[in-house]
Image (spheres, grey):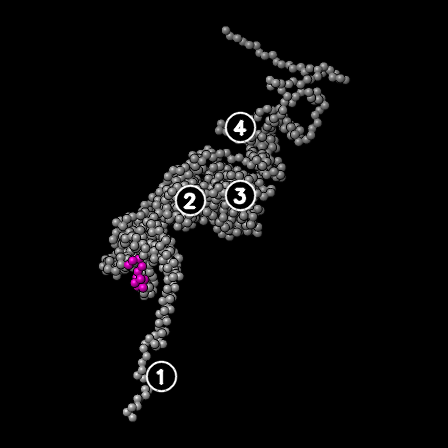
Amino acid sequence: MFGLEPKPNTNWRGESGLKKPFYTRVWFSALLILILLLALTALGIYAIIVAPLHAKAQTYDLAEIKKLESASLIYDRNGEEMSRIYVLNRTPVTIKDIPDHFIDALISQEDSRFFEHDGADYIGLIRAVWLNFKAGRDTQGASTITQQLARQTFGLMERSYRRKILEIFVAQRIEKEYSKSEILMLYLNRIFFGKNFHGIQAAARGYFGKDAKDLNLWESATIAALIKSPNNIEPIRHPERAKKERDWVLERMVIENHLSREEAEAAKLKPIVTTPMAINPQLSYAFDAAREEVVALLGEERAFSGGFKIYTSIDKDLQSQAEKAVKKRLAEVEKNPGYEHQTYDQFRAILADWRKKMTDGLLDPSTPRPKPEYLQGAALVVDNKDGAILALVGGRDFLDSQYNRATGSVRPVGTAFIPFVYAAAFSQPNVYPMTPLADEPLGNDRVMIGGFTGILGEYGMEVPNPKWSRTKISAREALVASHNSATVRLGENTILERGLLRQDFKDFVKNAGITSPLRDAASSCLGASEAKLDELCLAYSCFATGGKRPAKLHLIQRITDANDKTVFQIDEGSLQTVRAMDEIAAWQTHTCLDEALHRGTGSQSKEYGLGDFPAAGKTGTHHEYKDLWFMGYTSAVTCGVWVGFDKQKTIYPEAFSNKIALPIWTDIIGHSVEGHTPQEFTPPDSADRIEICRTSGLRATDYCYEKIKGPDGVSRSVRNTYFEYLRPGSSFSANCPIHTGEGLPADLAAFHQNMTAAASSETVLPADLTRYAHLEAVHMRDPIIIGDDPYNSEQPVLRARPVNEDGSPIRRAVPIGPEEGGEPIEAPIIKLKAPPPMKIEL
């Protein structure tokens, strides 16, 4: 019994008392396999993703980090330097020019472990995720300052984990290459702070009107808060948001022990008071437009490098005069007794008072900066032959409002649009400037401008209490004097169909250069549709150049980089003109606009100083005097002017464009002739010239004269006609029925009757006139009238004549003596009265 061994008990765990080693157990094998799989996966990820990204990070040239944009030079059309600007508005500063409290605000907001990590803050990443989760919003970014610098420098903008890994590797390289101070300086000179401010110095000047080194604590916190969302927080437009984010930065500074609680609370009480630095040459509408066009042409990434030489089409002297004209003339308008709105000087006082009260803490910190509400204006001058912009004024003060009204504002055109109604009509068969139109009241239900009932107003005539003649007037007279009712009647017959615009008219206007959509209603006949000033300038140039216009407008002609290598050159195709309308219709419209300027709605231009040179133009007044235009041109340039409020309202009762917009245009066009000499306009060769009676509008007769009393009191008969140019084949043959010669002396009337009959019939010469058949006809060799020829006299026709070698004419042999079978020809007897005796005194 003692030799027997006890048998072990068994259960589901196995035999009790016999334990296997842990490494032989199933769970260990599973764990080992899992670890091995994870290791293989990590190795695969590293080999497939991480290693290539690490290798790619080594390819970036870290020297690019120091290559900030340098100033670009802007030249005018003559190659003279106008200004030095930063395409991205940047002024680099050193780290010594950045106050410590700004560095503290930046570190607290963007990267609290900046001075501890090597470019990637893994602890900070985890903490940022946790804090953002707790706060329910993005309170901290996950990228370090060094990572942001890498992203900004090398354009690592893709939202993906691969970009994040690459960004970390590049950041670690940057940390090894540059010191912390250098990284901060490079970062703060590069990043975007909203509006067009790149870098700390531009932001300090743009928002607070001071250098970066002079920023106080709350200003520093305000700018530091902009980094995460510049456009949504920028303090000029969004002071409430800016204050909220600034206060959070101050709170972060307390958490990070850069600021005491008392200091933070005191700073939070300070209002957001923006004080942009006074305007300078780089802050103007023309230069800002040049900067935007450079970015559009080259792309923002390429434009970022800077150092460009930008050759513009701007005429420096004309640009200066245009800016002065807008400011001077609108200041005069504000002095009109009927003007009851904010003036430019009043806004300056309002702005100064707001700044003082904000500084003194008398206003709620969220009170926004006052916006200008004074009268605005815009002007644009373009070259007719190639579309070059010679002068551009987008408003009265770029500092108050950066909105460019010359190229961006879409406003009702008013009666400045009606030349296109007439040009489209003249393009149709049997519609001429002499076409009669009814000048009678018109029901507003057919146009619906300002209402649906009543009588359509004649505000286009630009005179108080306009009257209808209640007779027929010519289309020419309707355009010259800007008759609204007559214009609508013309439109109903030519460009409207069932009260809607015909498609061919829409195409006509678009071809002219106005691409803004037209309102599909009869009111568009009088300019109820909106358009931009640059579109109108392009379209009006058609009338100056025989129906052709530049392909497009341009401001930049050439750009070279820092090495003088051309990076942009405007192509020749953009400088060519395109056919926009029929040349005869364009000429007919032009002659009407010529008269509109000199004797029509623009006749006051002489009072404003219009010089004696060929020009034409049209006033433009919109309903209730809310938008005023004047569009005009010489053979060399087209100039457009707009005046109105940013928020539409009546300027003052009877504020016609010939009182407000025309003086600005007159000043600008007068200065344009100094460098852009106008030439005489010439009619198209293909047109037929006919003489028209001004009274009847029909073909003139020899009797179309009017009695005009001169300064000496003596009445004289003056030819009352002008010349029209019609397309060949036009059926216009009716003669003037008004001037019939009644009252002329009998001998003159009989002479006219005989001459008219002889000219209009094939009269056979009397037989007795054959005796003079041997005489040579007298032919004109030179014009009989020098200069203007109001009589449309016979012109000389060159004929071949036989001459001797010395140039003398060869005489013809003539018969002498009696003719065969007839009586001898009696020599004519000429009897002359004897001269009076001469008396000679000695």
Residue located farthest toward the bottom when viewing the structure as drawn: 1
Residue 790: image tag = none
Closer to the chain start, of discs 1 and 3, is 1
Which residues make up the magenta segment? Answer: 117-127
Mark 2 highlights which residue? 567
Is there a contact, CB below 8 Å, between mark 2 and mark 3?
no
Residue 435 vs residue 639: left or right? Answer: right
Mark 1 highlights which residue? 12
| Alpha carbon distance from label 2 to label 1 | 84 Å
Task: Provide residue 349's location: percent of width, then percent of height.
Answer: 31, 47
| Alpha carbon distance from label 2 to label 4 | 53 Å
Question: Within 10 Å of the Cα at label 3, are there few (<14), some (14-19), or many (20+) other Cα atoms?
Answer: many
Nearer the viewer's eye, disc 1 or disc 3? 1
Look at 46% across and 33% down and name the residue there: 612
Q: Look at the image and tell me whether residue 268 can be seen.
A: no
Closer to the chain start, of discs 2 and 1, is 1
Classify mark 2: helix, strand or loop.
strand
Residue 580: image tag = 3
**Kind of residue at disc 4:** Gly
